[in-house]
Amino acid sequence: MSPRTNNLLLGAALCAAMVAAHGVGAQEARLLSIRDDATRDRVRIFVEAARLRGTPTEPLVSRALEGIAFKADAKRIEQALAALEKRMRRAKELLAPHATVDELAAAADAIANRVPEKAISDLRRIAPRRSITVEIGVLTELVAKGVKPSVAATMVRDLMAKGATGAQLTELNAAVQQDVALGVTPMEALVLRTRGVMSLLPPAASVNAAQRP
Amino acid sequence: MHMSAAEIRFSAALLASAVMLPTPALAQGARHEARVEAGVARIDQPGTHSRNAFVLSGVRSHADSAFAALLAGNATWARDSVAAAQVIGALAWRPTAMSRWQLEGGASGAIFSFAKVGSDGNGSGWLRVRRQLGMHIGVTVGGAVGHTLRGSEQAHSNTVDLGAWVTGGALTLDFAASRVRTEDSLLMAASRIFTRSRSAWLDMHDIAATATWTHGQLELAATQRWRRGVRGTDAAQSATTAGATYAFTPRVALVVSAGRQLADPVRGAPDATTASAAVRFTFAELRDGAPLARESDVSVARMTDGSVLIVRIRAPARAKIEVAGSFSGWDPVPITLKGEIWEAQVHVPPGRHRVAYRVDGGAWRAPHGLARLREFDGEVGLIVVP
């Protein structure tokens, strides 16, 4: 390699290290807001260990801060972090080969809310090259609202397969929420609203063409 | 003006049944608490007959992450109108919220007889520095001074204390070693510690170990104390006390304790064996638990572009409303009162977010209409922004 290439590589490596260090520093700063020394130390140790295990730490830090806001004790926070890390590792397998941190966190929430694991991997299969954070989030919301997990999974999967965008899925979710508030059962509301969105989507052939990388 | 020996012994022993040295605990976020405890005690002391007594105590405290203050009082009455009372003020302070150093101090005043206020009593003060060494371990160093007055007789006492604590899971162990100095030979004699010389001062060494175990609503505590005279007396004593607190609800708890307490010359309390039972009422929890907003009074709306989340809560103007979420690092977001509606508008980035609100420091709840997730003994709402 030429000296110029070497310099470029070195510069890129330094930039990457600075960006990574900035991320770590930002999380450290967030942990500093935990005022109790013992709790902060336990969270820091757990997050550091998770980082070494290759687990994204941002969702762990966020969950720890949630525990602090809820006045949970250190032991309870540690248990929640351990459970979240376990779910994120499972989510990584389901979303392979590539998953963003947001996708992993969304899938971990989905698993915690009894969304079928197969539904998550199905969504990844339909959209292997773009973020499916919103889709997983909508699926989780629907299940948490009382829609049968298998039905919610089928509806979201079918809508995705027909090319529904994240915004359309979010609108569908909001519409279901309004219907439920008016007394419609979550299942009926989902079926009804899904038909409405389906009618606006283009035919399958053009969808496949659009989703092709 | 002198009290009889039995009166001296027993009225001070009444204090022993209720004497306390509370330390205000620092808290995450501001916390106010008021407690009242009422119960009965049976008191036995060498040289007097056993008596039943009624004990009433109250504690008012305020705490945040760097400063805590506490005001407590207790009074004890026996059937024949012998009474004692104590008032305590205590503070705890850290230089910063994250400091490992903590300074604690306080003062207490006691009267041994309601009929002789001003002539029979005790005043004391203490100061202690606490240093956290690690996640589960720390040390303390401190001291206390006391002055006891009985008619025209006065006596001074002081202690120097070294301590350590260690926690593991639900168990906390505290150890303390103290050097106790007193010239209160009358109190010591009532506690079966007799002088072997004409020395005005007695020196004793105390070792104490306390174990506290908490499981759910139950807290158990036991203390073993050993005392050995090193100057002016060769007395050797030991005593054990044990207690339990069971919280039936966050507001109501049963507190029982039994055992022997060695004489505390700094606070003028003699050796006594007591058994007590009391009911504790915590008023702050009552306020925290009472929802001011009904579920249907809370709503969440998303602007059409999805980037702004609006949380509206119908609650009285006097209410303290907090909205927080993963988008704010779980720090409360600004909220304003518009008519009868509290409203928070939050810019949120695309993705999934968790959001919750609470009223007057009560439990965190998910806004109405959102998917609810149970977490940390509360709930959060799940919201997805495209």
Image (cartoon, coloured by chain):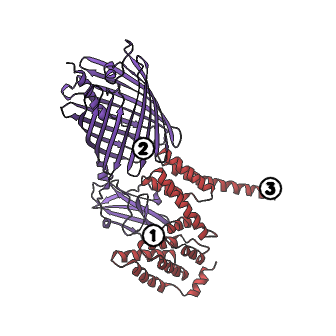
Q: Are marks 2 and 1 in contact (CB under 8 Å)?
A: no
* Chain A: colour as depicted: red
The residue type indicated by label 3 comes to Pro
Task: Decide which of A64, B55 is in the foreground and name it.
Answer: B55
Secondary structure of the residue carrying numbered label 2: loop
* Chain B: colour as depicted: purple
- Does the image show residue B306? yes
Q: Name the residue under label 2.
A: B65
Percent of width and height locating residue B210:
43, 37
User: Separation of disc 1 and disc 3 at Cα?
Assistant: 49 Å
Q: In this view, does B220 lie above or below B227?
A: below
Percent of width and height locating residue B269:
31, 28
Q: Which of marks 1 and 3 is in front?
A: 1
In which chain is the residue bearing label 3?
A
Q: In this image, A159 relative to A53: left or right?
A: left
- Does the image show residue A19? no
User: Disc number at residue B368?
Assistant: none
Q: In which quarter of the image is residue B238?
A: top left
Q: Mark 3 points at which residue?
A: A3
Percent of width and height locating residue B341:
30, 62
Percent of width and height locating residue B39:
26, 42
Do callouts 2 and 1 point to residues on the same chain?
Answer: yes
Q: In this image, A49 relative to A113: left or right?
A: right
Residue under the image location 39 percent in, 46 percent down = B219
Q: Mark 1 points at which residue?
A: B306
